[in-house]
Amino acid sequence: MDADAFRRHGHLLVDWIADYLDHSERYPVLARVKPGEITAALPDAAPEDPEPFDAIMADFERVLVPGLTHWNHPGFMAYFAITGSPPGVLADFLSAALNQQAMLWRTSPAATELEAVTLGWLRRLIGLPDSFEGVIYDTASIATLHAIVAAREVAIAGVREKGLAGRHNVPRARVYCSDQTHSSIDKAVIAIGLGHQSLRKIPSDEFYQMRAVALSAAIAEDRAAGLLPIAVVATVGTTSTTSVDPVPAIADICERERLWLHVDAAYGGVAAMLPSHAHVLAGADRADSVVVNPHKWLFTPFDLSAFYCRRMDVVRAAFSLTPEYLRTAEGAAVRNLMDTGVQLGRRFRSLKLWMILRSYGARFLRARLADHIRLAQELASWIDAHPDFERLAPVPFSVVCFRWKPAGIPRSDQELDAANERLIDLVNGSGQIFLSHTRLRNRLALRVAIGHLRTDETHVRRAWDLLLEHAHQLS
Amino acid sequence: MDADAFRRHGHLLVDWIADYLDHSERYPVLARVKPGEITAALPDAAPEDPEPFDAIMADFERVLVPGLTHWNHPGFMAYFAITGSPPGVLADFLSAALNQQAMLWRTSPAATELEAVTLGWLRRLIGLPDSFEGVIYDTASIATLHAIVAAREVAIAGVREKGLAGRHNVPRARVYCSDQTHSSIDKAVIAIGLGHQSLRKIPSDEFYQMRAVALSAAIAEDRAAGLLPIAVVATVGTTSTTSVDPVPAIADICERERLWLHVDAAYGGVAAMLPSHAHVLAGADRADSVVVNPHKWLFTPFDLSAFYCRRMDVVRAAFSLTPEYLRTAEGAAVRNLMDTGVQLGRRFRSLKLWMILRSYGARFLRARLADHIRLAQELASWIDAHPDFERLAPVPFSVVCFRWKPAGIPRSDQELDAANERLIDLVNGSGQIFLSHTRLRNRLALRVAIGHLRTDETHVRRAWDLLLEHAHQLS
């Protein structure tokens, strides 16, 4: 593909994408293909000869588009609603063309320094102090893995060199989180060799927040049993209900017990930009590390996870390792991003955060987050006012958990679960809205997550109307 | 940014990128900024109000472009030369707009199934058998980490649940690689809790290939010492010299010793597409896992690392974990990509591999790889024929290692190291070519890596001329 062809196809693609970003509603938000359908429509082998880009795009539209679940759709309210915003999409286009590898400062001074600058911008917006150094990872899963490795590095002498096995003086470690914590914590402790049993899940209270008293007791019990507590993961915006763990109380415990405190604010952290929600990061200034995902609720195309650490020297002590072919004349005068992690190659991710923050400005971003929170409160109020629906959790951010529970018809939780499953399938089958579910106190809960840049009152109203309409049909 | 603005800025950006992809030579390939210069040119905080995209692009050109090291430049011959090719760049643009999350089949049937299809295409092109299932990770570092976790899962009963520490029947593990293996293996054993000492580096021979006999002896010695050998990492295309370990002999040893064999073919694997180089993956069909990076030498914008595994069930056994909020009706009828790794979120990376393979066709891609290999051979022949230069390693692919060693002037290795350091700085200072170095048998070696899509004879000739010219000046 030469420059002329790139230009021609690029311009056509800009028009396709412009149209898509504005009108993704014309597609059913949840894909309707059957398993194997896409595979069956594609050949088994790569072509020997070049194919025209127009033909590739035609196949994209014919074969792949029906197999897309449209995350970039204002009716997407499942899991967490995310957005590939226009300036972010343009930035990722540029980033692909530049193909920077910011492993060493010299291999991309721009990507290395812009990463620090934009993470500083975001840090100030959410009110974390200057003592936190930032680094971008792909996902919060990887950020958390690095946090737990750092905790392990502090707690277990010689672990980098000697590892964990076959050492008489290394007891089993313990990491604490609540029973509402994201599965990435489970995967992290498994991956780094602590074992799944090392993760002790502290019961949450009626508001799905970690019970600090139970955490204290668990640590004391584990110490008495000869186990080695090393870290606590507190969550600001859990995955099921977006509950907020009591970080100040947990920070007290971590200070007293000398444990690494990692705050998983992947979803909820950006809300601290709002004066009304600055409190959600209260206590996080005393954490050792905090993760916030602009690719969740800050309109940044996936992937960009911001990891902030007050002890980045520990992360470096755990991971830095410079083979001869990566030594450079700049030496210690520069920060080499490869030193803060497992991955050597790194994309120019800060470019999109920079373009988004500048293109929208902080005021607009705060207003959009506030809108989402307000819309969630409105939906919650409709649910609360309706005799046939029951809200199942508080709404601290923009996610509402509830279930359909027809008034006057006594039904078991099991019957209600089945009814709600049918209801969610009908709503999702509409193609207009995509909701997901969770399980709360062993009851199936519907989850409406509001977070797409273009989601407004009409979409939330539509979701509610569809719920009412299909619930009525099912009755 | 509304649709009209996106269209306008998108079209301008297409023109900027088209121009860049064709004329990146107008920039000095190695950035000339000083540490801190970019940071100093940028404000400390995000703006409150929106800024016009034109102003952002103007700052991009004024502040950031001078801080780019141009990896997408045909004179980039450092580390491994990579390419963000035009169809790959367009695909990444589209991928950012679609913002797919292929964690579950239902959250992106297209991305889930296209990943399997395109990895099948690549697998057949490089001649790996159908018994290998593929999955895309971001980097070979992460792919290798997963391979070693899988090896650990097989070798150490109960490791997923119980971990490594404080267990009387779990001895220290051993992982083997050569002294030429990439640092990502070191980082993997550190991260997963085996400890750096668990990695035993087997001496390489005069051609920088692992000595299979020494591997055998090391395993026997370790077993006798009560250590637990679990895996061997063989490399096809090492980072310093692109040497190829004797995979068939290593596979024999792994079969006999029941060790997981991981083949790191991140750079060299794609060369197996060529009939002349199919032998580089000989024995890899008997490996447990193989990693090949299209983002290295297959013109794919970073990141896309293809991991092939004959025992993906083990990777799943190590990592799969489905919280309630991720359960879906499809159940076991579909493959959920989140089950094969640490990361939950995953970009729609297969789209670029699909567009690249179709847009160029296999024949062209093979021809381009063959050209790069031929150009490297030519450069090697010029070096061999010149009395003042000394080649320091064989050239199995497209990387040449050598040094300047003026004839008739006896100099110590130390003096030659210093002279070669000056030479490389002068060549890199030209802005036309960027070379890196390595250290071979304690001698500083210059490294010319040929691999950019647009690198042709003129660039290689230019690199050679610059070397001769600056060597002459230094004499």
Image: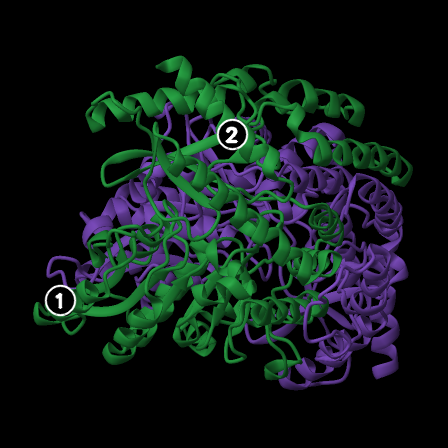
Chain colours: A purple, B green
A401 up-or-down from B77: above or below: below
**The residue marked by circle 2 belongs to what chain?**
B
Residue type marked 1: Asp
**The residue marked by circle 1 belongs to what chain?**
B
Residue farthest to the left, as pictured: B225
Q: Between residues A431 and B37, which one lies in front from this camera angle?
A: B37
The x and y percentages for residue B393 are: 34, 45
Identify the residue position indicated by label 2 in the image.
B463
Q: Looking at the rendering, which quadrant does residue B283 occupy?
A: bottom left
Name the mark on residue B222.
Answer: 1
Left or right of residue A185, residue B410 in this image: left
Left or right of residue B149, residue A429 in this image: right
Could you tell me which secondary element the residue under label 1 belongs to?
A: helix
Q: Looking at the rendering, which quadrant does residue B402 occupy?
A: top left
Q: Residues within 10 Å of mark 1 (few under 14, many from 20)?
A: some
Residue type marked 2: Ala
Could you tell me which secondary element the residue under label 2 belongs to?
A: helix
A450 up-or-down from A437: above or below: above
Discs 2, 1 touching: Cβ within 8 Å: no
**Is residue B286 among the parts visible in the rendering?**
yes
Name the mark on residue A435.
Answer: none
B42 up-or-down from B437: above or below: above
Disc on the earlier residue, 2 or 1? 1
Q: Residues within 10 Å of mark 2 (few under 14, many from 20)?
A: many
**Is residue A394 among the parts visible in the rendering?**
no
Q: Between residues B249 and A145, which one lies in front from this camera angle?
A: B249
How far is disc 2 from disc 1 in space, using C-alphas?
A: 46 Å
The x and y percentages for residue B409 are: 24, 20
Residue located 70% across and 43% down the image: A299
Residue located 62% across and 61% down the image: A393
Q: Between residues B13 and A449, which one lies in front from this camera angle?
A: B13
